[in-house]
Amino acid sequence: MAIEVRIPTILRTYTGGEKAVNADGANLHALIDALDASHPGIKGRLLEDNGDLRRFVNIYINDEDVRFIGSLDAELSDGDQVVILPAVAGGAR
Amino acid sequence: MTRYDSLLASVGGTPLVGLPRLSAPFNADGRPQVRIWAKLEDRNPTGSIKDRPALRMIEEAEKSGLLTPGCTILEPTSGNTGISIAMAATLKGYRTVFVMPENTSEERRQLLRMWGAEIVSSPAAGGSNEAVRVAKQIAAEHPDWVMLYQYGNDANALAHEEGTGPEILADLPSITHFVAGLGTTGTLMGVGRFFRKAKAEVRIVAAEPRYGELVYGLRNLDEGFVPELYDADLIDSRFSVGPRDAVRRVRELLELEGIFAGISTGAILHAALGQAAKVAKAGEGADIAFVVADGGWKYLSTGAYEGTIDEAEDRLEGQLWA
C-alpha cells in the first residue's frame, strides 16, 4: 500500500527537504505513526501531547478535511493522497 | 420589488438560477433528479457577496454607538469586503483604511482607491493571516479607529443567517445541500445556523481555497489562524480545492451556463459537483445550491481566464485568488 503525503515547507526539515513522501497505514493514526518512524519528530508537530490533531494543522485525505471524516480514525486506501497544511484564512475577501 | 430608496437598500435579494447543463450528467433516465443552483451574489451593488456582511457590520456598529460620523474604519481584507465597506462608507461619510496582502489583484486596489480608500500593503507570505496581524497592530496604534473585523464580527454571519439563508430556502424549499467558500467563514456560519433551525437535514459543505506554496510560506504551525466566527459543528464536510480545479470549473461555468464568475466560485462549484456525483452514485435526488461569490472582472489580470489550464495554474502560483 502506498499513500502519498504532501509535506508543507515548514515540516520539510523532517523529510530531508522532500515535498512529498510515501507512507502506509490503514487509517490516519497508523499513517502518522509510520511517518514518524521514517521521519522521527514529525508526529510531535502534527499532534498534541494528548494525541489530538493540533489546532492549526489541517490534514486532508483526497482534498477532504479529516476533521469531518473521523479525524485520526479516518480510513485510508491505496492511492489516497494526504495533504498537510497550516491553517490559513482562506478566501478572506 | 425592484425599486429602492438608495443603493444600500438594494443589497441582497439576489437571483437563484438553475444550471441545467452542469446538472445533466448526473441525471440518467428514470433516476431521481439532481439539480444544481447558483445564488448570484455578484448581483449585489459592488458585485460581491461581501455587500451583505459589510453593510450589516456597519449598521450594527452604528447602532451600538461604536461608529459615529467622521470615524475611520480599518479592516484587513483581500479585496471584496474592503470594496463593500468603501462603497457604504462613501455614502455614509466615513474614512476607510484597508490592510491588503500585496499579492492581490490590481483591479481590487484600483477599485478601492476609486472609492476613496487608503491601502496599507501587508507581506504576500502568509496571505490574509498577515493582513490580519498588521491590521491588529495598526488598530493598537490608533485606538480611535474602528476595526469591524470581519473574522470575528457576529454581524458578518448574521447578515447571512437573516438574509442569504432565508432567501435560498424561500426560492428552493426542496434544498438538500448548501455549498459556499470558507474564508471569514461568515457565509457558512450564518447560512449553516439558519438551516440547522429551519431545515436541519440540509448538508452544509465548505470549499476552502488551497493556494500555492508561496502563500503558505514558512508559516509556523503553532501560529496558524482560525477565524473567531468558525464553529465546525455548523459544517458537515469541508474540501480543500486547488487552483487547477477552481480554474477548470470557473471556465465550465462560463462555457456551459454563461456565468462569468470569480476564481473562488470555481472552487465552490467543484465542491458542489463533488456532492452531485456522490448523490447520483447513491441513486438519490438532490437540490444543491452554491454561492457565486463574485464576478470574474476583478481577476482578469491574474491570467486565469486565458490560455490552457496549465498556464493559468502557473500564473496563479503565489497569488491570493479567492
Image: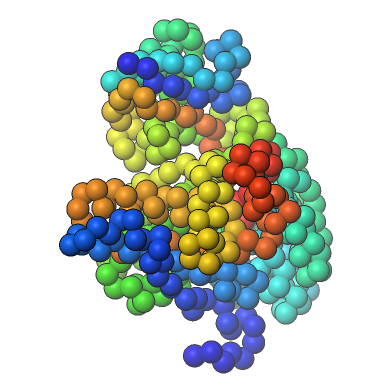
Observer-nearest of A45 and B42: B42
Tell me residue A47's x, y (percent): 43, 23
> In the picture provided, is B242 more to the left or to the right than B192?
right
The residue shown at (69%, 42%) is: B315
Tell me residue B167's x, y (percent): 41, 75
> In the picture provided, is A47 more to the left or to the right than B198?
right
Tell me residue B263's x, y (percent): 58, 53
Above or below residue B94? Residue B185 is above
Observer-nearest of B68 and A68: A68
Tell me residue A40's x, y (percent): 48, 8
Above or below residue B241? Residue B188 is below
Colour setup of the view: rainbow
The residue shown at (59%, 44%) is: B309
The residue shown at (53%, 37%) is: A87
Quarter of image, res B66? bottom right
The residue shown at (54%, 33%) is: A86
Above or below residue A76? Residue B147 is below
> In the picture provided, is A77 more to the left or to the right than B140?
left
Above or below residue B73? Residue B206 is above
Quarter of image, res A52? top left
Can residue B53 be seen in this snapshot?
Answer: no
